[in-house]
Image (cartoon, rainbow, N blue to C red):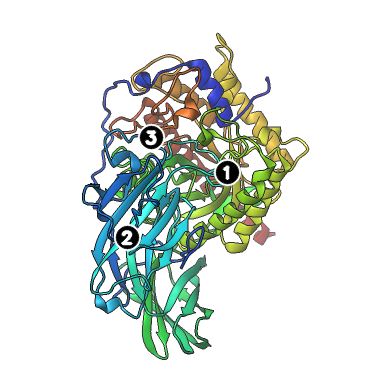
Amino acid sequence: MPDVRTGRDTRRIFLKELGASATAIMGAGLSRGFPAGKPDAPGRNSVGAETHGSPSAEASSVRQEIDLSGPWRFQIDPWKEGELLHYFSPDFPSEDWCKVSIPRAFDDCAPGMYKFRGVCWFCRDFEVPVSMRGKRVVLRFEGVNYNTSVWVNGKLAGENGDAFLPFEFAVDEFLRFGQQNRIAVRVDNILRPGQLPTTEYWQGQGGILREVRLVATDQAHLTQVRISATPEMEKGNFALAASVTNGRAQLANLALQVTIRDREGRTLASLKASPVAVDAGKEAELSVAGELPQVKIWSPEQPTLYSARVDLLSDGKLADQQVTQFGFRRIEARDGKLWLNGKPLFLMGFDRHEDSPRTGMAVDLETARQDFLAIKEAGSNFVRFCHYPHHPGELDLCDEIGLLVLSEIPLCAWGVVGTNYDPFSGGGWSASDVPAILDNAKRQLRKMILRDINHPSIIFWSVSNESQEQHPEIHETNNCLLQLARQFDPTRLATHVSDHWSTETNKNYFQFDDAICVNGYPWMSRRSGDKSWLEKSAQWWREELARLHARHPDKPIVITDFGYPSVQGVNGPLGEDTQVLATKTEFEAMTSPYVCGATLWCFAKHPWAPASLDFQKISFDVGPYGYVSRDRKTEMKAFSTVRTMFRQRAKSLEESASNQSVDNSRSIRRREQC
């Protein structure tokens, strides 16, 4: 076969040759009844203070919280003069600013804002109760894209440049207790050199995309809780480590008391950590461990969850409390296979972007729930979160529903050359960017892992997607991040997603990967009039995967990105019938024992940045890739095919495992008889 390029660069070539229009992409088609979701309810640091709280932690009576999502005021700042005009001042007249409800993307703040790039401001007035005085009070944002400056009552509280991740600032010194207070937030979605994401392979949106709240705790408080829970025969090994801070003015004796309960609220165990003397202003690590009898494991078939209530005691009195859910499960990569709880694992599922037809990239957990249920109903056990940390509520849903997850930082397509006029489509390769990108990637990897470490659904940490790893500096960055991920969390698999794997040759791109994750689109190399392209695509997968396995015989291989585009209601080269044939043919080529998963790009069609898809003045508004329409009202014909082939593969694997178990039993009996 001819040399075949894989990944998004070949998608660009394909789409340039195709010349389809946005009108065709949004063309009409008969609805096939896909369910639509319901609307969801409404210190200074250059990158934002790190927040280590568990995303599934529940509020307790010990902590005080004020939900600051909901009504805010909004103003566009096209000439970037807001600071000069003191938009941040508590006395600035903002009555004529338009009213919006947060979380919200720029695109939905006012008519004509779709795909806006630039600077906007948000402000809100609220009252802080006197009961918060004397406590540690932080202003927490779950996610703002991309660059944020926050003022409280005219004082700069801090700045942040890490998109898709939470940050918080201590604000008690700025607050007026028992009175009205004003928060002003300046946000822009203009990427700087060296900032992540390195490239947008989606329609990036600015705004306060996730929740905002004010949180008051004791000066002695929990800063992060990390749980390790693994099954061992019929018991469960449980270990919990808590980072604690004594912000009081004097030494405090801090201790932990951990209560573990099942979903019915029954107490299974109570563990205690002896008091540790922690000096004023210092931090400490406290830990507990124990065995729980007869626990149920977490798996896609039976996603059993437990909760751990962590009480922090200061001199014997309750100072802080956090409740976190978790599950007992073990993920391993050995002997060229994936193993979940000691059983062979084959992953089947979809890639999915955090995109809602109602809210864009702003949080919409009801649509996420409907998506995950549809993915699970199709026979999937896996979803890849593309290409940035998703809202933690989505992980809660995967924990609950039983979907395994790959989560990754937005080190996306580093080194890809985009169009000349839009920096978001890929800035190409520049060695001068390496130090900043490495620093930003390290920090965001750490923040993502510490935020999400207690979710049993996550089995992979991915450190990059489709970067130009033929550059030694990018390859070395991947290796550094992979080792860092394993250092932060040795209980999960560290990987990166490659689209250069078929050209690896003398290089070893996967030296530090626990599992090899690859993307490929061989059908894009077909020539006009070639009627054998489907057969050649299948042959390419079989041959290239065999070569990859020969280079790395001990590592499992997961296809994290394959598929075929379609336009709704259309037949022919970009038709739904062709998507059916291509999807089925390529999936059937992924049957070798060292192939441990196949993931389709992608679940739902979503907006793509014009610069990523604009060739010869032809622009795509919504990308053609997807097995469900963006509004979730239509399943492509291929979705039914996927449902059938996933279920058939699962049945075949189950029968094979059963036969293997019988053969093993017979072999044991024969040895005993001898």
User: Looking at the picture, which amino acid does disc 3 mark?
Assistant: Lys
Residue 392 coordinates in the image, percent (x, y): 40, 55
When the figure is inspected, residue 309 is found, relative to residue 431, above or below; the finding is below
* Residue in view at x 68 percent, y 23 percent: 3
Residue for point 52% across, 86% down: 279
How far is the residue under mark 2 from the one under mark 1? 29 Å
Q: Is residue 176 visible?
A: yes
- For disc 3, the neighbor class at 10 Å (few under 14, some 14 to 19, many from 20) is some
Disc 1 marks a residue whose amino acid type is Pro
Along the line of sight, the residue nearer the viewer: 214 or 620: 214
Query: As displayed, is residue 71 above or below residue 241?
Result: above
- SS at badge 3: loop
Quadrant of the snapshot with the N terminus: top right
Q: Give the CA separation, mark 2 to mark 3.
A: 26 Å
- Closer mark to the observer between disc 2 and disc 3: 2
Mark 2 or mark 3: name the one nearer the start of the chain.
3
Q: Residue furthest right?
A: 506
**Circle 2/circle 3 CB separation < 8 Å:** no
Residue 437 numbered tag: none
**Residue receiving disc 2:** 183
> Residue 298, how many percent across, how many down?
44, 59
Q: Which residue is mark 1?
A: 193
Q: Amino acid at mark 2?
A: Ile
Please state, as top left, top right, bottom left or bottom right, where the C terminus lies in the image: bottom right
Secondary-structure class at tag 2: strand
Residue 115: mark: 3
Q: Residues within 10 Å of mark 1 (few under 14, many from 20)?
A: some
- Label 2 neighbour load within 10 Å: few <14, some 14-19, many 20+: many
Visible residue check, residue 399: no
